[in-house]
Amino acid sequence: MSRFERYFLMNKDDVIEYVKEKTNLFSKDSVLTCEEIGDGNLNYVYRVSEAKTNTSIIVKHAGDVARISDDIVVSTNRINIEANILQLQAQYAPSLVPKVYVHDDIMNCFIMEDLSDHEIMRDALLSYKIFPKFADDITTFLVNTLLPTTDVVMDHKEKKKLLKKYINPDLCEITEDLVYTEPYNDINNRNILFEPNKEWIIKEIYNDDKLRLEVAKLKFDFMTHAQALIHGDLHTGSIFIKEDSTKVIDAEFAFYGPIGYDVGNVIANLVFAYVNGVTFHKTEFVNWLEQTIKDVLDLFIEKFSKSWDEYVTDIMAKEPGFKQWYIDQILESTAGVTGLELTRRIIGLAKVKDITSISDPNDRVRAERICLTLAKKLIKNRDTFKKGEHYLEELFHALNA
Ligand code: SR1
Ligand code: MG
């Protein structure tokens, strides 16, 4: 019996043996090398290469605890959710996700196209690189993967089948805790506050009762609003990019949730890059990000509205006024989620390099306060953020606060 008929956590040598034995991607006598290249919080990512033919593939593999902490036990099924959803997204947005070659739900891994000519977007942004196509690409991804999986477009029984298939309780629990609870109530003692900002955060976030009430409303929206099959973790570390190409990866948090969760995560993570750029006076980069933040919101609305007219099937959804109502509640949720993501990456366990790499303490204090000041406005006044320019106006207020 093959060693790979029963799950175990593979190391680099195991991965080479696995690839040779279980796939026909390389010949059995090929000389392969393997490196672990993942820097995510949950899974292992191996690049397997053959020098002779200059070919390489990526093996993504799940352990039964999160890399970021042994205390976080997460179902290995997350890798199967990710492999399946990547293949589904490939039907809706083929040029915007990597190709999956092999999926193995026993070893909890899948093999996909190597995107080594791309780089992780967060790292690229930390080198102040500019991607003029990004807003167009990511809004196409959002609209093309989200709208078709809603009840307004998809056959309702088909949708319920997908909802059942992509039930993802462990990963949703991580989000419910890390995004929607702990930054406002350090119940699990896992928050990490930057010491010079501690007093300010206690006063402005922990002690703001109105803010916590609005977060509570958003939390129950996340848990109960099975609107579309969302990516669930669409930050700039989940995007591979190069000048003329964008590929969305890491969909292990996918489930049926609110559309605004994906849109808001994109915008918040652009704001982190923006605040870093402002800190280091990267004018051209900052200007591009202002335009991009605005474009992501405005292009999303424009494309969503156009696709709605083309693809909506539900007869009641065609009632005059319903489309605007539907888009308005997505925009409200988007603003709220943007604020939540901005907050949790400053206060909670899972940080972002855009902020933690700011080594001057005064600069970091300022960067964190800009994000949190904006976040509070976004969460509390979320029904007023209807266009890209509304985000920029509030961002400029926070910069000057
Ligand atoms: C325990 S996982 C921490 C964070 O990393 C993932 O990318 C998600 O954003 C999650 O919240
Ligand atoms: Mg990830």
Image (cartoon, rainbow, N blue to C red):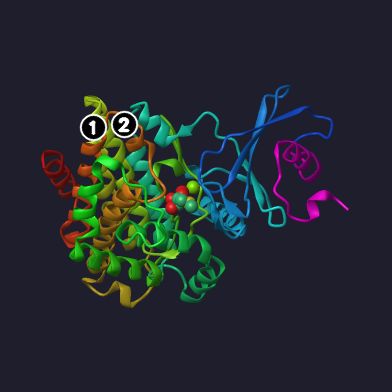
User: In the image, which disc is placed on residue 76?
Assistant: none
Where 116 sits versus 104, above or below? above
Q: Quadrant of the C terminus?
A: top left
Relative placement, left or right, of 274 versus 86 is left
Residue sitting at the far top: 52
Question: Count of labels shown?
Answer: 2
Is label 1 in contact with label 2 (beta carbons under 8 Å)? yes
Residue 72 picture location, percent across and down? 53, 56
Q: Assign a secondary structure to mark 2.
A: loop
**Which residue shows up at 72% across the image and 40% down it?**
15
Residue 46 picture location, percent across and down? 63, 38
Relative placement, left or right, of 270 versus 377 is right
Label 1, label 2: how far apart the Cα atoms are: 7 Å
Can residue 70 be seen in the rendering of this structure? Answer: yes
Q: Amino acid at mark 1?
A: Asp
On the image, which quarter does residue 214 sit in?
A: bottom left
Of the two numbered discs 1 and 2 on the same chain, state the one appearing first in sequence: 2
On the image, which quarter does residue 222 sit in?
A: bottom left
Can residue 233 be seen in the rendering of this structure? Answer: no
Q: Assign a secondary structure to mark 1.
A: helix
Where 230 sits versus 224, above or below? above
Residue that label 1 marks = 363
Q: Nearer the viewer, residue 50 or 38?
A: 38
Residue sitting at the far right: 1
Magenta segment: 1-25
Is residue 236 highlighted in magenta?
no
| Ligand 1 lies under 8 Å from the Cβ of mark 2 | no
Q: Nearer the viewer, residue 142 or 187?
A: 187
Residue 268 picture location, percent across and down? 30, 47
Q: Amino acid at mark 2?
A: Ile
Residue that label 2 marks = 358
**Which residue shows up at 60% across the image and 43% down it?**
44
